[in-house]
Image: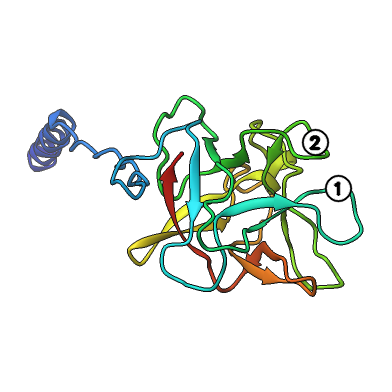
Amino acid sequence: MRMMGSAFLVLSFLLFALAAKPLPRVAAGAAPEPVLDIAGKVLRTGTNYYDILPVERGRGGGITFAITGHKSCPVDVMLEDYEDSDGLPLQFIPANRKKGVIRLSTDLNIKFPGPASCAATAVWKVEKYDKLTSQMFISTSGVEGNPGPETVDNWFKIEKYGNDYKLVFCPTVCNDHCKVLCKDIGIYVDKEGFKRLALSDVPLKVKFKKF
């Protein structure tokens, strides 16, 4: 009985010592790396930027929008024909609007600051699968803010691509509540010669230039 009592005391002491020992602190996850413009400055929420091609020659100029085909809406996002054209300014709005810095791998809206020709806003959105071209194009029929399953097609990310960046569609605004298709944003040249932005296996390499 004495041996059992002694063993119990020793076990109790060890348990007390372990309980009294402070637990190691778990380091908080570091914030994703900020996105930089061509001047080396961080991209800011709501600031106007040009989205420009940095390396590939002959692919077109900056990003703009236009109506293609025989439709009136939605307005398609595309590249300018001329490489010397910066295109139209763009704004980046993160899902957490309180964040003033645009960072890699974070959900954000991309929009032209002015209205589109058939909508009050010009927020980017991934359109449904187009059977004629087998593409999913980027239009300006999106809705700003309100992250969740209802707006999942309106959210994009910026990722590193070599020494530059690429735009990606892989939203995480609805966690595990919806299935999404993760793809890069690339270029599809249609039969009229328009260089339209669409989901692609070949990403468009971009840099950012402050307006």
Quarter of the image for residue 123 reads top right
Instruction: Write down the quadrant of residue 3 in the picture.
Output: top left
Task: Residue 122: give x, y in percent of width and height.
Answer: 70, 39
Task: From the top left corner, tell me how far across and down residue 16 is, in percent.
Answer: 15, 30
85 lies left or right of 66: left
> Where is residue 197, by image quadrant?
bottom right
Distance from disc 2 to disc 1, alpha carbons, whole Å, reads: 8 Å
In the picture provided, is 111 more to the left or to the right than 31?
right
Residue 50 located left or right of residue 136: left
Kindly identify which residue carries mark 2. 119
Q: Report the front residue among 20 and 25.
A: 25
The outermost residue toward the top is 98
Q: As displayed, is residue 182 above or below residue 17? A: below
Left or right: residue 62 versus residue 98 is right
* Mark earlier in primary sequence (2, 1): 1
Tell me where residue 163 appears, x and y as whole percent: 32, 63
Q: Which mark is residue 73?
A: 1
Number of callouts in the render?
2
Q: Amino acid at mark 2?
A: Ala
